[in-house]
Amino acid sequence: MNKPGRTFARPLAEFVGPCLGDVFARQGFASGDIVTHWAEIVGDDVAQLAEPLKLQWPRGGGEHASEPATLVLRVEGPAAIEVQHLAPVILERINRYFGWRAVARIAIRQAPLARRPRKVRPPAPSPAETAQVAASLGAIDDPGLRDALARLGAAIKRR
């Protein structure tokens, strides 16, 4: 009699990845990394202004074509000129993320962005919390270092 193997909870990404793979492929993305990690790739300042729509590869090519792709970005009207000026920075960050010259150009489509909730930063620790942690620190000669460690300790204790 064969016993069934232990079953463990599997990450949701194992199920969602294959489902969304076809959707991303239709938009020219080999994987969803550029969409799901957009803010980490280009930075929060650019991510607030633009979002990727699709990658347009040259005809007859694919992800590893001899010519790089064009990244189509959705940008709200007033921010389009700023994104256009930031294009070299965006291209450099995307290509650095991929590790090869995957994208050579950026095309801008003006449309409203799909607003995502911003991550809310927790407030800084109060001076009383910082002082309490500072009192528990050992002998530290540098006052700047002592204050920085006290703030760090208070922030960690809050969580």
Image: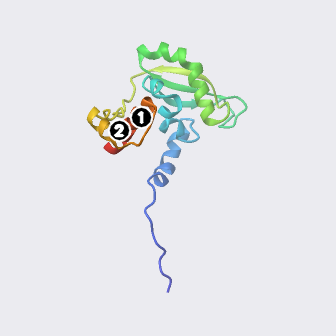
Amino acid type assigned to the residue bearing label 2 in the image: Ala
- 116 lies above or below 156: above
Considering depth in this image, is 26 or 50 the residue closer to the camera? 50
Q: Residue furthest right?
A: 66
Sequence-wise first label, 2 or 1: 2
Q: Which mark is residue 146?
A: 1
The quadrant where residue 10 appears: bottom left
Q: Residue furthest bottom?
A: 1
Q: Residue at x 50, y 41 (%)?
A: 23
- The foreground one among 105 and 142 is 142
Q: Amino acid at mark 1?
A: Arg
- Whether the residues at callouts 2 and 1 have beta carbons within 8 Å, the answer is yes
Q: Residue at x 41, y 34 (%)?
A: 146
Residue 49, x across and y down, in percent: 44, 22
The alpha-carbon separation of the residues under discs 2 and 1 comes to: 7 Å
Q: Secondary structure at mark 1?
A: helix
